[in-house]
Image (cartoon, rainbow, N blue to C red):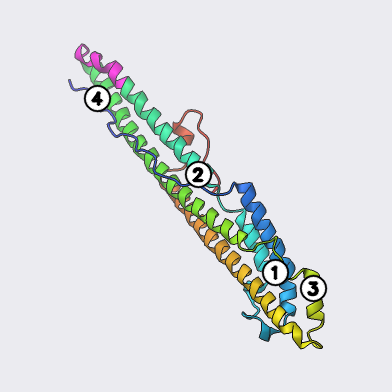
Amino acid sequence: MTRPDRPLRLVPAAGPVDLAGPPRAALLGAVDLAVGLLTAHLPRWSAVPPRWRGVPSGPDTDPETVRRAGAEARELPDPAALAAQAEALREAATLVRRQHVETADDLGPLWDTWAGPSADAVQKRVSALARSAHGLVGELGDTADVFEVAAARVAAAVRDLAAGAAAVRPADPVGGLPPAQVDALLAAVRVDAGVETPLRAYAADLEERLHRFLGAASRSRAAGREAGARVRERLAAGGGDPLRSSGPGASGPPSV
């Protein structure tokens, strides 16, 4: 009589995930400050004569576009939660493998002394469990890989968005001009030719801040949605969250 198969596949080691970046609360706070400054100044920018601006007015210079970018930042998944889910999947895989190996070791001596139809039936059952455990370990490990890749991509997106928000420099007057002074220059457009130079500088500064913020927001949104789609695709292919039915004390995956 042969002994039942054991799940020999080792649980793959965790991949390197760079989670460096601001905490979620700090990120969203920086985004809010950036949105506040840009939306406060875009109406003033619109009042600058078009020939003094570096870009034409359009959807990307609409305050609503900026507000929407700020709202979408809150939809970016939390990379730390994704990485924690990957770790939980690997822990579950390790537990499944260890429990099966220990069971097979405990039953080993039995196959040397027990024979007959009942022994064959039990052996077939244990062998089937071994194959199931082997497959489950692989499923958990592969899903953990997907979560880790998603965590790394979202963490990079968080850093990009944080840099875009920081580029707005909410503490610095746009164009070096306090808002009241900008309003005074705009009021004198028709009577004072000297306002052209400072208003051109003001418009260029605001446009640069706006461009960097919206660019980072767009990239981070795309990265977050792609990472979330990959995770959902993997979970759907595997029949859902493997931790719901395999890991003791398991919890569902983070929202993606």
Does residue 37 appear in this view? yes
Q: CA distance from mark 2 to mark 1?
A: 38 Å
Left/right of residue 199 with respect to residue 164 in the rendered view: right
Looking at the image, the residue that sits furthest to the left is 1
Frontmost residue, 47 versus 187: 187
Prevalent SS, magenta region: helix
Residue 20, above or below 114: below
Image quarter hosting the N terminus: top left
Frontmost residue, 117 versus 113: 113
N-terminal label among 4 and 2: 4
Residue under label 2: 82
Please name the amino acid that badge 1 sits on: Val
- Which segment did they paint magenta? 103-115
Residue under label 1: 174
Residue under label 3: 181
Q: CA distance from mark 4 to mark 1?
A: 73 Å
The residue located at (69%, 72%) in the rendering is 175
